[in-house]
Image: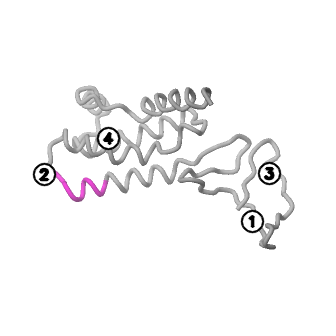
């Protein structure tokens, strides 16, 4: 598959044929190494699949454990099993503020389910109490680490 991005992404491109005479299709979105890229004027990643993966993993944990485990155990499972699904590969993409907010919203929704509340202040207090970092904070750390490794090469 082929995907275009940049100022001319909307212009139709000629068909490309591989060395074995297969025609490569032009697509508007594609998955490469687990990251979903979309056709855009800038290099852009789609977060929809990551959010679905997070919800799937979190609902699996909630479904298996339910209310049996303590909040600490549930949060540790979410932190170690679900959040990595959400932020996988995003340190290589330019994620804007609204996308960061949508990642944080996904985690906040799981907190509302876990603590049985719809009050965002209660959710934030629980996150502070249990020292739970939102994906925007974790992703910022991962970006710094990624850039330091890229700059040393």
Among numbered discs 3 and 2, the one appearing first in the sequence: 3
Marks 3/4: CA–CA distance: 39 Å
| Type of colouring | one colour
Which residue sits at x=42%, y=54%? 53
The residue labelled by disc 1 is 25
Extreme-left residue of the structure: 68
The segment highlighted magenta reads 59-67
Extreme-bottom residue of the structure: 21
Marks 2/1: CA–CA distance: 50 Å
The residue labelled by disc 2 is 68
Which residue sits at x=56%, y=53%? 33
Foreground label between 1 and 3: 1
Q: Position of residue 31 (x, y in %)?
A: 59, 56
Among numbered discs 1 and 3, the one appearing first in the sequence: 3
The residue labelled by disc 3 is 10
Q: Are marks 2 and 1 in contact (CB under 8 Å)?
A: no
Density class for disc 2 (Cα within 10 Å; few <14, some 14-19, many ≥20) is few
Marks 4/2: CA–CA distance: 18 Å
């Amino acid at each position: 598959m082929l995907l275009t991005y940049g100022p001319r992404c909307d212009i139709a491109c000629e068909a490309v044929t591989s060395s074995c005479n297969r025609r490569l299709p032009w697509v508007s979105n594609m998955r490469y190494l687990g990251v979903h890229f979309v056709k855009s004027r800038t290099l852009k990643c789609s977060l929809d699949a990551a959010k679905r993966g997070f919800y799937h993993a979190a609902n699996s944990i909630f479904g298996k454990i339910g209310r049996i485990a303590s909040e600490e155990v549930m949060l540790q499972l979410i932190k170690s099993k679900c959040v990595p699904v959400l932020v996988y590969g995003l340190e290589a993409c330019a994620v804007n503020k609204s996308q960061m907010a949508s990642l944080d919203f996904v985690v906040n929704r799981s907190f509302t389910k876990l603590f049985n509340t719809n009050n965002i202040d209660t959710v934030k207090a629980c996150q502070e109490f249990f020292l739970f970092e939102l994906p925007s904070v974790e992703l910022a750390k991962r970006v710094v680490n990624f850039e330091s490794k890229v700059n040393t090469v």
